Image (spheres, rainbow, N blue to C red):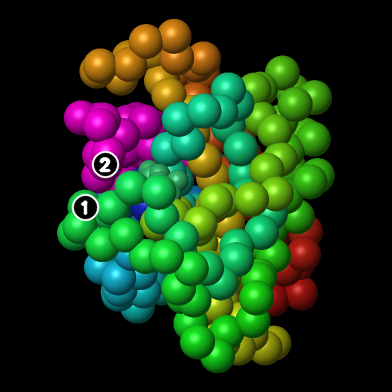
Amino acid sequence: MRTVLITAFEPFGQDTENAAALVCEHLLDSGPGYRVLKRILPVEFVAAREALLSYMDEIRPDLVLCLGQAAGRSEITPERTAVNLMDAKIPDNAGWMPDEVPIFLEGPAAYFTNVPVKSVVQAAREAGYPAALSNSAGTYVCNCVFYSLMNRIAYTPSNEATPPLWGDFIHIPYIKEQKGVENAPLSLKQATETVRFLLEAIIKQMDSHNQFF
Ligand code: PCA
């Protein structure tokens, strides 16, 4: 049984609800071979990163999927790349608006997700789900959380007894049921089912990669 940590965010900016939190709330708590634990992160650069890492210490997941809202998008977009940069156009919920600040001074410029994201997205599209691969999680709080997640994974040793920890970030567009939002591209049901398909496709990939553990 795999343990999956799914995080989403509080509302931010002009919005009174966050699409990612709605999807997170509607995901089932378990499925074939996995159970899901859900946590909501603050939309604050420093506090979100600390909250994610402490939830990972508490839950010790096998897979971490962080969900966030991306207003301009029309599909569910798993992210490929996290960059070592905080560069905000609006203040975070703590009032901080970093201008070209690195996340970790000594960190690499970028990390890739260790989820085979291209094939997982392709499988979702072939099954008719509205998913597309994204190469940039932006430079706001979502990217900061994604970079911090991949940095933690980079420093989490795996060996014959401990299978590798997997992680990715998935951006969610506006949702039709979301309060105060017009012309949203997806319904809550479509978005939730797409995320569930992606989650289960990732678990299948983990099963085939980790068959020796
Ligand atoms: N989206 C923002 C931060 C929180 C959220 O849901 C982002 O894309 O950075």
* Residue annotated with mark 1: 93
Q: Residue at x 31, y 34 (%)?
A: 18
Q: Residue at x 72, y 18 (%)?
A: 128
Q: Is residue 130 above or below residue 51?
A: above
Residue 125 image offset from top left, x and y in percent: 75, 26
Which one is in front, 201 or 93?
93
Left/right placement of residue 38 relative to residue 93 reads right
Q: What secondary structure is marked by label 1? A: loop
> Is residue 202 inside the magenta stretch?
no
Q: What secondary structure is marked by label 2? A: loop
Ligand 1 within 8 angstroms of badge 2 C-beta: yes
Span highlighted in magenta in the image: 9-31
Q: Which mark is residue 12?
A: 2
Amino acid type of the residue tagged 1 in the rendering: Asn
Q: Is residue 156 above or below residue 129?
A: below
Q: Residue at x 28, y 52 (%)?
A: 91
Q: Which mark is residue 39?
A: none
Q: Residue at x 57, y 84 (%)?
A: 107
- In the picture, residue 123 is in which quadrant? top right
Which one is in front, 64 or 100?
100
Which one is in front, 63 or 88?
88
Residue 78 image offset from top left, x and y in percent: 62, 44
Left/right placement of residue 88 relative to residue 117 reads left
Looking at the image, the residue that sits furthest to the front is: 99
Viewer can see residue 164 = no
Amino acid type of the residue tagged 2 in the rendering: Phe
Residue 95 image offset from top left, x and y in percent: 20, 57
